[in-house]
Image: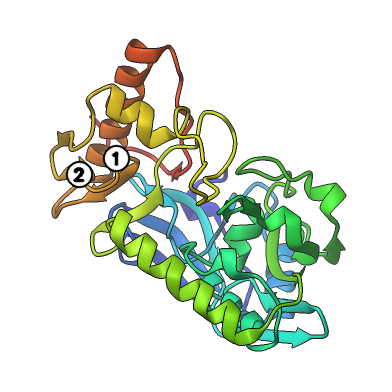
Amino acid sequence: MAAQSEIILPAVRGRLTRQKPLAELTWLRVGGPAEHLFQPADIQDLADFLRQLDPDVQVFPMGVGSNLIVRDGGLRAVVIRLGRGFNGIEADGGTVTAGAAALDAHVAKKAADAGIDLTFLRTIPGSIGGAVRMNAGCYGSYTADVFVSATIVTRQGDIREITAQELDFQYRQTALPEGAVLVSATLRGPKGDPAELHARMEAQLQKRDETQPVRDRSAGSTFRNPAGFSSTGRADDVHDLKAWKVIDNAGMRGARRGGAQMSEKHSNFLINTGGATAADLEGLGEDVRKKVYEDSGITLEWEIMRIGDPLPE
C-alpha cells in the first residue's frame, strides 16, 4: 500500500474523514483509527470514488460493526461505511429489496408487515450487507436460503448485479469479490400471516433475551459452530458440537483477560466488561481456542472478524 503521504483521494460528494476512530463505530467499542473513513452520498458517489482511487490503496467495507474487532493500532485503509441512502427497505410481491445498511431486524419486521417470512433475521445483529457477506443465519435458516440477487460496486468502480452462484454461499462465508462493496440485496421468503410472523419474532426475542447477554457489550457469537450449522431452536436440536458446549467443556465459561470476558450467560459470547482493549478481546479468544483444542482436539474458527494492526510492542 502506498505511504499515507502519497495517497491522493478522489473528490467526493459524501464525507471523507482522516484518522477516524473506529472504536465508536463497533459494538465492542475497541480499536484504533481508520486511515480514512468514506461515507458515500449515493451509489454513484461510491462508484466514482472507487474507480478513481489508487488501486494500491486497500479498502474495507464496514457495516454497523456488530461482528468486528478492530485492533488497537488501527487500520491502514479507506474504510467505507454506508449510511443514509443505503438503508431503504421495499417489499414487492414475495420479495424484499433492502439497502446494505438496513438493519436485519428492520428488514424482518418490514417483510412480516408484507406477509413475507424473513423472521430468522429478527434476532441477528447487524445489517443486510453483513448478513449476505457472512451468510448469517439462525434457527436453521440462512441468508442463502432466501437470497435472490445483490447489487455491488466492484473495487474498479463498476456497478453490477451478483448472483448466488457467484457468491458461493457456505457456512458463515461467501466469495464476495475482494474490495467489492455490497450496496443492496433482494430476498424472497415464504408467504405468511403478518400477525403470526410478528408473534413468532416476539417469541424469538424473548428466548434470545433469556439465553444471550443482550445488555452486555458484545459482538454476537464469537466462534463458528464446529459442526458447521446454526442452532435450529427446536427441542430436538443436538448441542454436542455447538461452540458454547465445547467452550463449557474446556472450562472457559466466564474466563477473563483484562477487561474481556467470555459471558457467564452464554459462553460463546465475548464481552467488553469495560475498559477492554482489542488485544484483551482477541487474546482471550485465542486462550479459549487453545483450551478447547487441548480439551477436545477441536479447533474453533473465529466468527468475529478481526482487522487492522496491533499496537507496536
Up the image or down, 270 lies above or below 274; here it is above
Instruction: Give the residue type that dot 1 points to.
Output: Ser
Which element is circle 1 on?
loop
Q: Quadrant of the C terminus?
A: top left
Instruction: Give the residue type that dot 2 points to.
Output: Glu
> Label 2 belongs to which residue?
264
Q: Residues within 10 Å of mark 1 (few under 14, many from 20)?
A: many
Up the image or down, 59 lies above or below 119; here it is above
**Which residue is pictured at 52% across the width and 72% down the height?**
200
For the residues labelled 1 and 2, say whether their Cβ atoms are less than 8 Å apart: yes
| Left or right of residue 44: residue 93 | right
Q: Quadrant of residue 188?
A: bottom right
Give x and y (percent) for residue 21. 33, 62
Q: State how far apart marks 1 and 2 are (Cα).
A: 6 Å
| Left or right of residue 77: residue 274 | left
Which element is circle 2 on?
loop
Q: Quadrant of the N terminus?
A: top right
Residue 26 in sight here: no
**Which residue is pictured at 29% across the width and 40% down the height?**
267
Residue 182's tag is none
Give x and y (percent) for residue 39. 54, 75
Residue 267's tag is 1
Q: Residues within 10 Å of mark 2 (few under 14, many from 20)?
A: some
**Which residue is pictured at 23% across the width and 48% down the height?**
265
Give x and y (percent) for residue 271. 25, 49
Q: Quadrant of residue 250?
A: top left
**Which residue is pictured at 33% across the width and 11% down the height?**
294
Give x and y (percent) for residue 305. 47, 44
Of the pair 263 and 190, the residue shown nearer to us: 190
Of the pair 73 and 298, the residue shown nearer to us: 298
Residue 101 in sight here: yes
